[in-house]
Image (cartoon, helix red, strand yellow):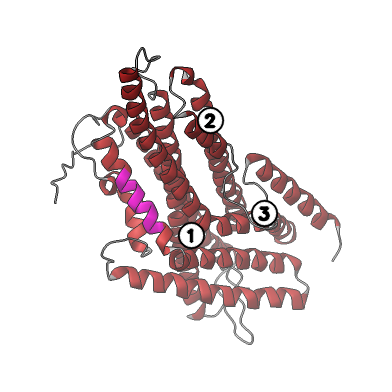
Amino acid sequence: MKNHKEPSINLSQENFDFSTGYVDPFEFHKTCFMFLKAFQVWDGAIPKWTYLLKALILFCGLSALTLLQLGFYHGLDTRDLPYMTESGTYVLIMIYKLLIMSCTVWNLPDYHNLLRIIREDFQYVCNKGKKYRERFFQNQLKIWKICQISMVFLVCIALGMMLFSIASLIWYLKTHGSEIGTRPLPFPIWVPHVDIGKSPLYEVCLIYSNICVVTYAINFIFMMQIQILWIGEIATKADLVIWSIEDLMNGIRPALNKQEELYFSTLLKQRMQEIVKIHKSMIELMTSYARVYTKLLMFEQKVCAPVVCLSAYGATEILEKTGEINGILVILCIATIISVFIPSCLCNFLSIKVSSICYACWNIPFWNATPVIRPYIVLIMQRSLRPLPIKASGFEEVSIETFSNKMASAYSFYNMLRHIKI
């Protein structure tokens, strides 16, 4: 066993020292690996408390889905379109939550592959690839910061929903009194022949609703954190390939005799072997990412327009009919737009980063090399120009353009619902 030095570093600073010692990836990305353990996709010992967490998340997801389906049926039966659209919106979100949970079971080997490759990369730059150390850790620092920003954003969304539900209740009690009307709940909960507004059932439903918000936030933070880490790691792999290609011809010149030709050929083969190895690892990591996230991105792509449209429509109708602002639906609408924009932006970035390997190959003075490496250069260029392996039947490319089209569709559907009479 090697004794790995774990330097005490302040990740909030730009200029901390990466120059010496082994940096443990699980200390560097501590938050991400905490979530990997919590959702039992860790390749080491699984803490016992994680079973309770997953059981709670599954219970909240399945029970909330059942209650929201009842609410959707009630809205359909009474022809209450705002109630029906609000329930339908949350039904889609609960299905997405369960789909994220299913990935932690079906795609467990892919998560383990991510962990293995991260270990290999940190080991590589701390030993064999020391010359790329500083640039590598600058990339890792950017990944860490984006992960923290996304987590803070999602925590604020969850806190905003819970605080608004409590503020709505306080405002209602102040203006109506506890005996008049039905006290508001964060989400449309309806059960046949049961008065949800009576105590203590109302208090139980209010606490249950806020627990559901917390569990969904944890679930979504896990999904977003690991997605950012995964794409960032693929992009860092691509950078390692680019940096290695840029250094490929260092010290190489046209051979003056057979001895030099043999020496340069051997040197180029060794360097090329390292490049091909890193490139294959990048492709393997990208394939694993596609197996996990294609289904999630496809679901996002199909339901983001309906969720944005229905949440905006429900909030507008409630405002017009009751004069009350449904802050939870407003927050949900904004959060959905941003949460769908982030992976679209990340996949756009990843596509550009991977294709830039081709330009790195083109920019080196390959004419000084022996013909031995040229077929490998051509193969790497061809492979780098392929589209990302995130594809399925009826699935559009994940990009800013597709996101823009979906938001335009959501706005069109919103206007249509506002102008029809049901």
- Of the pair 166 and 151, the residue shown nearer to us: 151
Q: Nearer the viewer, mark 3 or mark 1?
A: 3
Q: Badge 3 local density, few (<14 within 10 Å), some, or many (20+)? A: some
Disc 2 from disc 1: Cα separation: 49 Å
Disc 2 is placed on an element classified as helix
> Is 109 left or right of 385, judged from the image as shown?
left
**Image height check: is 107 above or below 414?**
below
Magenta stretch bounds: 111-120
Q: Position of residue 197 (x, y in %)?
A: 57, 77
Q: Position of residue 166 (x, y in %)?
A: 49, 61
Q: Quadrant of residue 121?
A: top left
Residues at circles 3 and 1 in contact by the CB criterion of under 8 Å: no
Amino acid tagged 1: Met
Q: Which residue is mark 2?
A: 358
User: Can you give x and y, in whole percent of width and height, for residue 231 in the image?
Assistant: 47, 44
Residue assigned mark 3: 395
Residue at position x 76%, y 78% from top?
A: 77
